[in-house]
Amino acid sequence: MALLEIRDLHVGVENRGIIRGVHLNVNAGELHAIMGPNGSGKSTLSHVIAGKPGYEITGGQVLFRGENLLRMEPNERAAKGVFLAFQYPVDIPGVTTTNFLRAALNAQRKARGQQEFSTPEFLKRVREVAGSLNIPQDMLKRGVNVGFSGGEKKRNEILQMALFEPSLCLLDEIDSGLDIDALRTVASGINALRSPERAMIVITHYRRLLDHIVPDIVHVMSRGRIRKSGGKELALELEACGYAQFEDAA
Amino acid sequence: MVAVQETIERVRRIDVDQYRYGFETLIESDKAPKGLSEDTVRFISAKKSEPAWMLQWRLEAYRRWLTMTEPTWARVDYPKIDFQDLYYYAAPKPKKTVTSLDEIDPEILKTYEKLGIPLREVAMLEGVEPKVGEEDPARRKIAVDAVFDSVSVATTFKAELKKAGVIFMPISEAIREHPELVQKHLGSVVPTSDNFYATLNSAVFSDGSFVYVPPGVRCPMELSTYFRINERNTGQFERTLIIADKGSYVSYLEGCTAPQRDENQLHAAVVELVALDDAEIKYSTVQNWYPGNSEGKGGIYNFVTKRGDCRGAHSKISWTQVETGSAITWKYPSCILRGDNSRGEFYSIAISNGFQQVDSGTKMIHLGKNTSSRIISKGIAAGRSQNTYRGLVTAHRKATGTRNFTACDSLLIGDKCGAHTVPYIEAKNSSATFEHEATTSKISENVLFYCIQRGLSQEEAVGLVVNGFVKQVLQKLPMEFAVEAQKLISISLDGSVG
Ligand SMILES: Nc1ncnc2c1ncn2[C@@H]1O[C@H](COP(=O)(O)OP(=O)(O)OP(=O)(O)O)[C@@H](O)[C@H]1O
Ligand SMILES: [Mg+2]
């Protein structure tokens, strides 16, 4: 059984179709890349998998380990191992990153019937992970993403992913706004988390990221559908020829 | 924010209509006859064995009150109160002088235990002299005065405070034991003719706390009063008077709860603070009176007058309030900055949910030179509630070099509630520097989704975001109460979204 199975998914906003028949199978251990022009529905797809309200599911199914994901609350999905690194992470003034991470991690553990981490245990873990991502300790004491640079926000997303150890990681433009060194740090953070039990879907506009984190499968999305899927060479082809060839009359 | 996790658990366990403090204690009580007349005033005064001057003071207030009408300028709406349909005095029976906790009705002790106020525990600590090196330094002592309906039932740590020269006792006792202090200061900050509710309070107040800190003394522990309205149809009119003599310091906290009842109950308290030269008073409130049910039935009418007088040079008064309860709140803790270089502060968190109506804020009256004040107000409106900040900052003609900074932030949860900001600013001299900032925002769907995607429930996410929003004010509370207040905030917003 695939870890994630999307069957003929249709999603609309205000009576306008945005996802228009997506099929996708992602097995544990795989890394999929989704590329495609602006507005083609990539973020929408990741939002729907994670359970963001405000979208109308007009058809199809999303199964996670065979379970109907669309019927679960977003926090239930998180506890079951669905993680979304946001294209635009929000800031939460007055709530320190450390407290936020601890509240979230313990909420997930509790939902899974696991023992919650004590404060010292938690702090030890978060410091280790932050260290490996070059995230300074004082950043953890600041409000969540408050005053963080674009690159810092993205590293903070990876920090959370590493801490929560999800089984399905959706990374929406994790490479946007990163300088060369930060890109390398983030990529090695992602690579460190690749494992046979875990699957990742990486949304990106740039082949550059895929040089660091080599995908098993590349999908091209355009106007709400996956138009083509292939190996990592597809990313090179896209870079050379653009998206025009994948548009159809529909 | 040590308590985030605890907060979250607490929220999980509580359902919307479940006001945690809504139980009722079944004890016999001794009531004044229903209604208000000169006889009621005399009855209360006699019950308290008051001296003649006190009775005269009350009667003057009562006569004055008869000529006054209820204020209508606040943004609150409620049916007319029938002042003859209330009881003005209720004391738990048997009525006798209480000298130790053992003489207190065990039912009352149980009530305070349920409220989490450890009278018994604290008293035990008091009774046993701690051996050197044995006391747990983490356990800070808090002296508690507990007021049940109209009567103070217990004050703890009296002996230790006495050693420091601090007087902390029910005001009814202070009237008998320290008449010179009471007579000199009572009504000196909030005159008996001040406003409709303050005047009513002056006529019928039954109990409350009295604090005097002598010159140069730093009060060795937090002082705290817990108010509990238990009786039906009984108004609670407590009176608090705190005097910080020259160069002294005191931190005082009040907490309040009431049982869950379908009818509205009136609470009209008066608090007066006097700070002499170089003295500092820190006054914190965690107000959690019953707010009414989810349909807006019942709840406390909280009409309170609180004012501090920075009478001496370099004195300081700081109000911190966390207002989560009451059906209606009408409350403006204020500072009269009379002494040169004195400072007033007002830090407020006012949360309204369901059908609650809050009209609260502060007045900073700058009379002395180089006086400064700071106002930080955080209003959170949810459900169908209305939440108004009303503030006044004035500088007298002679109050040169005065400074004020005001920041009012409102957060709306949902689209059926309202937040309003009504600031009045009045500078009668050109050297005053007044700064005012105000923001109103809605709790963002994106922020909530971000939190929920990370595993938090909707309620936990709202609690977290709101606690972040009010953090600046929470930090002003004494540590122990900050934790409690944080929990309260999450609980009072439960069921506010969705
Ligand atoms: N809440 C919404 N209301 C209205 N339109 C929406 C909403 N969310 C998405 N859309 C529309 O759906 C389309 C797909 O948006 P989406 O963000 O999924 O694109 P994307 O592929 O992630 O683009 P980009 O590469 O620019 O990030 C866009 O036309 C967008 O305007
Ligand atoms: Mg996008």
Image: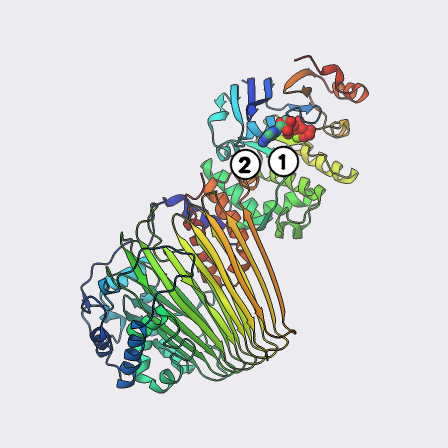
Q: Position of residue B336 (x, y in %)?
A: 50, 75
| Picture quarter with the C terminus of chain B | top left
The correct choice, above or below, for B268 with respect to A88 in the image is below
Q: Is the residue marked by circle 2 packed among few (<14), some (14-19), or many (20+) residues within 10 Å? A: many
The response on whether ligand 2 sits within 8 Å of label 1 is no
Residue assigned mark 2: B453
Q: Is the residue marked by circle 1 packed among few (<14), some (14-19), or many (20+) residues within 10 Å? A: many
Q: Is residue B408 left or right of residue B28?
A: right
Residue found farthest to the bottom: B180
Chain letter, disc 1 residue = A
Q: Where is residue A8 in the image (x, y as percent from the top left)?
A: 56, 16
The response on whether ligand 2 sits within 8 Å of label 2 is no
Cα distance in 3D space between marks 2 and 1: 10 Å
Number of numbered discs: 2
Amino acid under disc 1:
Phe
Q: Where is residue A244 in the image (x, y as percent from the top left)?
A: 75, 17
- Same chain for marks 2 and 1? no
Q: Which residue is drawn at 63% across and 25% down?
A: A41
Q: Which residue is drawn at 49% across and 41% down?
A: A107
Q: Nearer the viewer, residue B473 or B394?
A: B394
- Which quadrant of the figure shows ligand 1? top right
Residue assigned mark 1: A86
Q: Nearer the viewer, residue B222 or B476?
A: B476
